Amino acid sequence: KRLSMHPAADRVHQVGAVAARVGAVPGGALGRGLFDSGLLLGRAFVQGATGIVQAPVEGAARDGIRGAFQGVARGLVGAAIKPAAGVLEGLERGSEALRHATADGSGAGVGSRG
């Protein structure tokens, strides 16, 4: 079992795992790749948002008021950087899925007309 400090991110991961098991992602490799990239983006936003609250609490527990202020700064930076990194990773995964789908023919009509 996967453990995380971000329960909401775990729920996003669980939704993706269930969808993969039941085959709920249409479109073959392309659909799966796009679905995965969306999950990555959602997870990054959740982690960024939870970090705004979690980092100051952890900082305060570690170093008192000084740690709390450092945690606020760390949480705000993470709230900006984690979603940006998630967008980049999602784009990478999506483009990789498109490349694989068009290369092996499983793209279900990608790049072809009718």
Image (cartoon, helix red, strand yellow):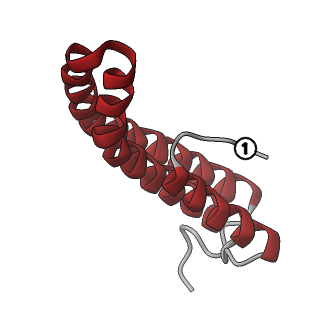
For residue 10, above or below residue 63:
below
Q: How many marks?
A: 1
Decide if residue 71 is in sight here.
yes
Say which residue label 1 marks.
Answer: 2
Using residue 41 as the reference point, say whether residue 26 is left or right of it: right
Q: Quadrant of the C terminus?
A: bottom right
- Amino acid residing under circle 1: Arg
**Residue 108 sits above or below residue 71 on the image:** below
Tell me residue 86's x, y (percent).
Answer: 42, 42
Would residue 83 be seen by someone viewing this image from the given angle?
no
Nearer-the-camera pick, 21 or 90: 21
Q: Position of residue 91 (x, y in %)?
A: 44, 46
Residue in the image at 62% along x and 56% along y: 13
Give x and y (percent) for residue 12.
Answer: 55, 60
Picture residue at 67% right of the left edge, 77% below the top: 26
Q: Secondary structure at mark 1?
A: loop
Q: Quadrant of residue 36?
A: bottom right
Quarter residue 32 falls in: bottom right
Q: Residue at x 38, y 23 (%)?
A: 61
Give residue 34's position: percent from left, percent from top.
Answer: 55, 61
Give the residue furthest to the bottom. Answer: 114
- Is residue 35 shown above or below 100? below
* Nearer the observer, 108 or 41: 41
Compared to 51, does 77 lie above or below? above
Q: Nearer the viewer, residue 66 or 75?
A: 66
- Judge from the rendering whether residue 84 lies leftward or rightward of residue 40; answer left or right: left
Q: Callout 1: few (<14), some (14-19), or many (20+) C-alpha neighbours within 10 Å? A: few
